[in-house]
Amino acid sequence: MEENANDAADGLAGLYHRVMDYPLFNLGESKFLVSQLVVLLLMVMAVFALEFVARRYVVLKLLGRTRMQPSLQYVIGRILGYVMIALGLFVALQTVGLNLSSLAIFASAIGVGVGFGLQNIVSNFMSGLIILAERPISVGDYVDVGGVGGRVREINLRSTTVVTNDNISIIVPNSDFIANTVTNFSHGDPKVRVRLPVGIAYGSDVQKFKRGMIDVALANEDVRRDPAPDVFFIGFGDSSLNFEVVVWADDQAFRPLRFKSGLYYAIEAKLRELDIEIPFPQRDLHIRSSSHRLPVEMADLKAPPAQG
């Protein structure tokens, strides 16, 4: 019975060695075995795990103690991570016995693939490097690109994640930030100007209206005192005197609808308090007398006979 157990163990060991020594493909004069693939996969997993831990330690522990901007900390962490991954993969390939010179044929195939079908991927990759280097956008910025507006949450080499005010994550290819016009509401100075069109009835006291709108703006804690809010007379409309209330605020581009809504509620209440009317559209119809008479014919409308 003991001999049978030993035979079974020897059989399993032999099967294990045959599987591990099975050649998957040839690279030049060498063979790439299953055992080498297993070691390579384990080393790649270890490289990515080490990169994740090291990047978080550098960004959160070391750079987090400095006065460096969070966006710059993120860029440094990303670049460090990519360098670690490249070095780790190089060491892993050398460890399993893969001579990089033997991969030249695969590099040639990749070059052909880039020429025919990978232009977008390479374009996004290069655009990601440009974004990380030049930093036209940073994590935390509020941007609008191609009609997509939101806060930048993450910048990767291929794409950038933008989160809208509706908490919807949109993946934007990095090439869009390079090829298209990008509006960055947070770049340099977070201060933004907000315009609120308001129309009042003809005959209203415009000076009283202006003072009331200034009071409404200054009563809002999000409105800056410098530059001071102002009211501009835009023109004479068909039914109203048209004004524009202009205020400055910090970071209100992140939530423009909520900010404008709060101001409009306050403006409506102030207009009621000042007894200033918001007019309805009006049209004047002029009927002139004439010696010419228009003939009018009366038609006898009869109901159609009932069916059935």
Image (cartoon, rainbow, N blue to C red):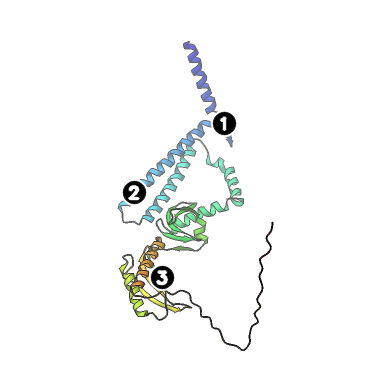
State the separation of the CA atoms marked 2 and 3: 42 Å
State the separation of the CA atoms marked 3 and 1: 72 Å
17 or 125, nearer to the observer: 125
294 horizontally vs 99: left or right: right
Task: Say few, some or many: other residues with alpha carbon within 10 Å of mark 1 (under 14 / 14 to 19 / 20 or more).
Answer: some
Q: Residue at x 55, y 84 (%)?
A: 287
Query: Extreme top residue here?
Result: 1
33 or 304, nearer to the observer: 304
Query: Extreme bottom residue here?
Result: 291
Could you say whether the residue bearing mark 3 is in a helix, strand or loop?
A: strand
Judged by depth in the image, the label closer to the viewer, 3 or 1, is: 3
Residue 68: % across, % down: 34, 56
Could you say whether the residue bearing mark 2 is in a helix, strand or loop?
A: helix
| Residue assigned mark 3 | 196
Residue 201, disc = none
Q: First in sequence, mark 2 or 3: give its number.
A: 2
Residue 204 occupies quadrant? bottom left
| Residue assigned mark 1 | 23
Judged by depth in the image, the label closer to the viewer, 1 or 2, is: 2
Could you say whether the residue bearing mark 1 is in a helix, strand or loop?
A: strand
Q: Which amino acid does label 3 sit on?
A: Leu
226 or 284, nearer to the observer: 284
Residue 8: % across, % down: 50, 17
| Residue assigned mark 2 | 60
